[in-house]
Image: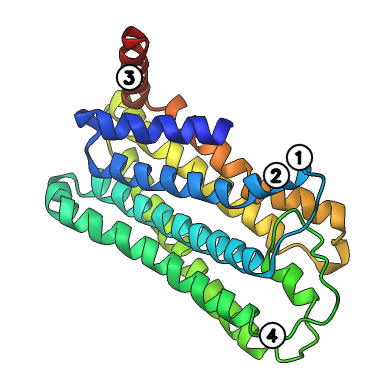
Amino acid sequence: LAALLGNGLIITTIICDHHLHTPMYFFLLNLSLLDLGYISTTIPKTLANSLWNTRAISYGGCAAQIFFVLFLFGAEYSILTVMAYDRYIAICKPLDYGTLLGSRACVHMAAAAWGAGFLHALLNTANTFSLPLCQGNAVVQFFCEIPQILKLSCSHSYFREVGLLVVGVFVALGCFVFIVVSYVQIFRAVLRIPSEQGQHRAFSTCLPHLVAVSLFVSTSMIAYLKPPSTSSPSLDLVMAVLYSVVPPAVNPLIYSLRNQQLKDAVWKLMTVLFKHH
């Protein structure tokens, strides 16, 4: 509910307030849409199963769930990378901001982020479900994810999966290095600002994004890079909740707490809505 309300409110506010029609808020709108999709892919099915006291999901439903989780996960990471570029241009090259981040460039970057997520999901889902499954049909998780499906496979042809995994890791590392390098440049530029007030204003536009990236990367790394020896069904469950539920629920809070312009816009929207009622 927190994720739905928070992200829904941010999306509505950005669409309705023309003061927020800037590259930074356009990318935040994309992030909120991805967060909404991400949490809606796993939680409703889990809640429905809980209400109807069942733990079943169809084969097609499981494949669809994996596809959308990977698609939205990949696209979100790409959007966070694009947002780092946006902050870098805004602080390090402010005079070129309007030229480098025009409306067409922003749409192209957002489309590339969604496209990258789609391609990543398509390749991994097709590869995973081309493997024969013969180790039962019980997925020890509250939603379908690739490591759990691979445990059910009796095929030893993991080379394609390893190949895709290596490519995915390299791309993810590339994005991470890009974000780190962008922030090194940003911090150097901010520290050169003579006034303390100017430094504070520049930092305050970067801090929410930095926290969102840290949360996204840390929860994903804890979930996927933990040693297999520490793996247990209950720990896997906690880790899955950590990376699939926490970021979409917390991101709206991160962005609205430190952003006065967004807070004012949300407050104005709420006031208008209450007046109409």
Q: Do the residues labelled 2 and 3 touch (CB within 8 Å)?
A: no
Q: Nearer the viewer, mark 1 or mark 4?
A: 1
Q: Can residue 184 be seen in this view?
A: no
Disc 3 packing (10 Å; few <14; some 14–19; many ≥20): some
Q: Where is residue 151 in the image (x, y as percent from the top left)?
A: 80, 75
Name the residue carrying label 1.
51
Q: Are marks 2 and 1 in contact (CB under 8 Å)?
A: yes
- Per the image, label 1 sits on a secondary structure element best described as helix
Q: Is residue 87 visible?
A: yes
Give the label on residue 131, or none. Answer: 4
At x 54% / y 51%, what residue is drawn? 38
Q: Which of marks 1 and 3 is in front?
A: 1
- Per the image, label 3 sits on a secondary structure element best described as helix
Disc 2 packing (10 Å; few <14; some 14–19; many ≥20): few
Q: In 3D space, how far apart are the residues under numbered discs 2 and 3 (Cα atoms)?
A: 33 Å
Name the residue carrying label 3.
269
Tell me if residue 191 comes above or below residue 152 in the rendering: above
- In the rendered structure, which amino acid carries the disc numbered 4? Leu
Q: In 3D space, how far apart are the residues under numbered discs 1 and 4 (Cα atoms)?
A: 32 Å
- Per the image, label 4 sits on a secondary structure element best described as loop
Of the image marks 2 and 3, the number of the one nearer the N terminus: 2
Q: Where is residue 58 in the image (x, y as percent from the top left)?
A: 69, 65
Of the image marks 4 and 3, the number of the one nearer the N terminus: 4
- Per the image, label 2 sits on a secondary structure element best described as helix
